[in-house]
Amino acid sequence: MTRRVRAIFLSDIHLGTRGCQAERLLDFLRDHEAEYLFLVGDIIDFWAMSRGIHWSAAQNTVVQKLLRRARHGEKIFLIPGNHDEALREYDDTAFGDVQVVRDHVHTGADGRRYLLIHGDEFDQVTRYHRWIAVLGDIGYNGLVRINAWLSWLRRRLNRPGYWSLAGYAKRKVKTAVSFIFDFEDSVIHAARERGMDGVICGHIHSACIRDAAGITYINCGDWVDSCTAIVEHLDGRMELVRHGVEQKPLLHAVATDSSRCNIDAKAA
């Protein structure tokens, strides 16, 4: 049954790569209709495509489906990230009824105001040491290729769900370096300075909803490792939806200020 929600927030789809879980995203889009759909960066991976393009039929269908939804009246906004940063040159331009904006303020049904940004400007490695980010991206894509073989093996062994080696490794690395570059706190600080009630971002592939002293921090996650999205219900309530993975819970509770976002530990 199709769920009608007020808004959908997606980030880090990484179209043009082998890791893109386009089929699972199509299933999610078939199951959800909305008035607003926000694409919160790294939708097309121009970084990876500069080294080699992997564009499947399912990825093509994702683009067609988004454009079709825009033609039928769904308000779709694209906020470019670092992997599709070339689109930032087209700020306030529409492509096939999809509006490109550098950032956006979304007012929820409950009146709360959310700053929508991809978030790469708060990642010190991406911002000041791009070569490290590029090397990390190449290594990450290598893990994604290995993961394709692991997925095949899991299917042969009749193991249910989807598990990502790349996502597992990335979460472990994030834990090790989080004390140096605290991405979440930087994003929350920026939202507070702009007088927002919350912030919705992507970039770090770590889906989460948590409260930080009155500011709601929301990360959409990704469609490479975790297959997650944020939906806003008709009453303004925000929900973290995890699609097509082994974990059973779909509804994510708001965490406390002292906690940190971790999709494995925080699913409620």
Image: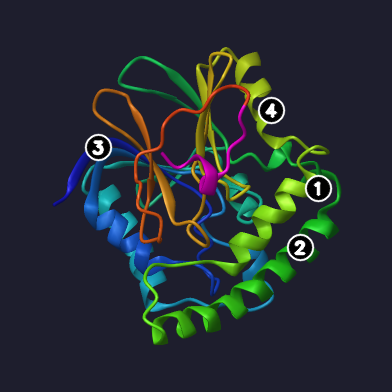
Q: Nearer the viewer, residue 54 or 241?
A: 241
Give the labeled residue for mark 3: 5
Which is nearer the N-term, disc 3 or disc 1?
Answer: 3
- The amino acid type found where label 2 is placed reads Gly
- The amino acid type found where label 4 is placed reads Asp
Which is nearer the N-term, disc 1 or disc 2?
Answer: 1
- The amino acid type found where label 1 is placed reads Val
Give the labeled residue for mark 1: 125
The residue stretch that appears in magenta: 259-268
**Cα distance between the residues tagged 4 and 3:** 29 Å
Local crowd size for mark 3, using a 10 Å CA cut-off: few (<14), some (14–19), many (≥20): some
Q: Nearer the viewer, residue 163 or 94?
A: 163
Examine the rendered structure and indicate whether residue 4 appears above or below residue 189. Answer: below
On residue 136, the disc is: 2
Count of numbered circles in the view: 4
Residue 204 in the figure: left or right of residue 110: right
| Element marked by disc 2 | helix
| Element marked by disc 1 | helix
Image coordinates of residue 215 in percent, x first then y, are: 55, 18
On residue 185, the disc is: 4
Q: Residue at x 64, y 51 (%)?
A: 85
Whether residue 252 appears in magenta in the rendering, the answer is: no
Which is nearer the N-term, disc 4 or disc 3?
Answer: 3
Q: Residue at x 35, y 53 (%)?
A: 248
Whether residue 267 appears in magenta in the rendering, the answer is: yes
